[in-house]
Image (cartoon, grey):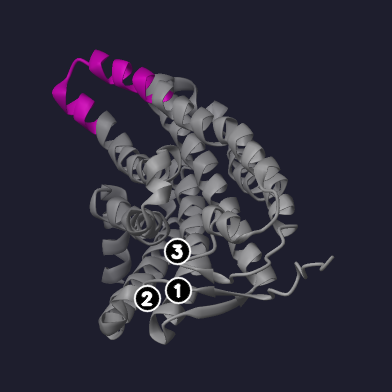
Amino acid sequence: MSVRNESRVTEIILLGFGNLYGFKILIFIIFLNIFLFTVSGNLLIIVLVSISRHLHSPMYFFLCHLSLSDIVLITNTLPILLDTILNGGKGMTILGCITQFYFFCGITLTECFLLTVMSYDRYLAICVPLRYVTIMDFTLRTCLSVLPWMLGFTSNLLGIIPVSNFQFCDGNIIDHIYCDFSPLQKLSCSDTSLVEFIAFLFSTPFFICPCGFITVTYIYILLMILRIPSTTGRQKAFSTCSSHLLVVGAFYGTLIIKYMIPSIGHLLLLNKIMSLLHTVFTPLFNPLVYSLRNQDIRLALRKISER
């Protein structure tokens, strides 16, 4: 009886957008500019909040953490994608691929929890404004900012550890823009039923519950805003939440379409597009929303430019 060598595949090839190889220079330049703008835009928000006294509030404190998570997300995926585009493919070790998947899962979960924390902050600011400062003190805001990072990068170990034990026997080509669960699962010759069960089991508390919490808090916020007698007061209250709502919609919209609709996983091109929107354009969207729609950020930027 012949024994198959299940450990002979040591390198995985990412194809990226191999079918658009004729436009690689143009695509490379576009994505490089997006990467530079996204990183610089999010860094600018962090710097402005750090040095501007009128931005030293819990809302902007959490915004700094959201910007940092966006930098980690796009830095984890886009530089490798740029290399893939330029060379028509990218070779990665099995460990490197799983490491990228680990950071992708960790930072995605972190953003889920950060957006939940930000919605709770907006709920306190609008629904219980008189107690907002005493409730959201330095200790609570520090705990609520550290906890998402800890939960994000520890809870995903429940799925990453079984994935790291996958055996890859025959093929080593992933037709995707980064190492994701579905391509690794299809490539593996191991029994992946346990990992699938774990992914399904923890998708509810780690994705659905934060989304549900955000929905409930904004229902209360909307009801409170409608009770404000003046139109100006209602507009001012809603403007403090509109940027966060847009970011939540973009973030959860791409996640739900990509992971919660089963047929999407079987449509390769659409799967790539949704992955691209989540990993590249969502981090770009956040600084655009908070810089263009937020008067405090624009004021801080104007003061810095006038110095």
Q: Which residue is mark 1?
A: 15
**Residue drawn at (26%, 63%), measured in percent from left and top?**
302
Q: Nearer the viewer, residue 297 or 288?
A: 288
Q: Are marks 2 and 3 in contact (CB under 8 Å)?
A: no
- SS of the residue under disc 1: loop
- Above or below for 96 versus 233: below
Q: CA distance from mark 2 to mark 1?
A: 5 Å
**Residue drawn at (52%, 50%), measured in percent from left and top?**
108
Classify mark 2: residues with Cα within 10 Å, few (<14), some (14-19) or many (20+): some
- SS of the residue under disc 2: helix
Q: Which residue is mark 3?
A: 47
Q: Nearer the viewer, residue 68 or 209?
A: 209
Judge depth for marks 1 and 3 and give the one in front. Answer: 1
Between disc 1 and disc 3, whose residue precedes?
1
Q: Which residue is mark 2?
A: 18
Identify the disc placed on residue 50.
none
Q: Amino acid at mark 2?
A: Gly
> Looking at the picture, how far across and down is residue 118, in whole percent?
46, 37
Q: CA distance from mark 2 to mark 3?
A: 38 Å
In the rendered view, does 164 fall on the left or right side of 263? right
Q: Is residue 231 magenta?
A: yes
Q: Which of the 4 image quadrants contains residue 298?
A: bottom left
- Above or below for 123 versus 31: above
Instruction: Quarter of the image for the N terminus: give it.
Output: bottom right
Q: CA distance from mark 1 to mark 3?
A: 36 Å
> Looking at the picture, how far across and down is residue 45, in whole percent?
40, 59
Q: Which residues are magenta?
A: 217-236
Q: Are marks 2 and 1 in contact (CB under 8 Å)?
A: yes
Considering every residue shown, the one lying at the far front of the view is 1
Q: Nearer the viewer, residue 207 or 261?
A: 261
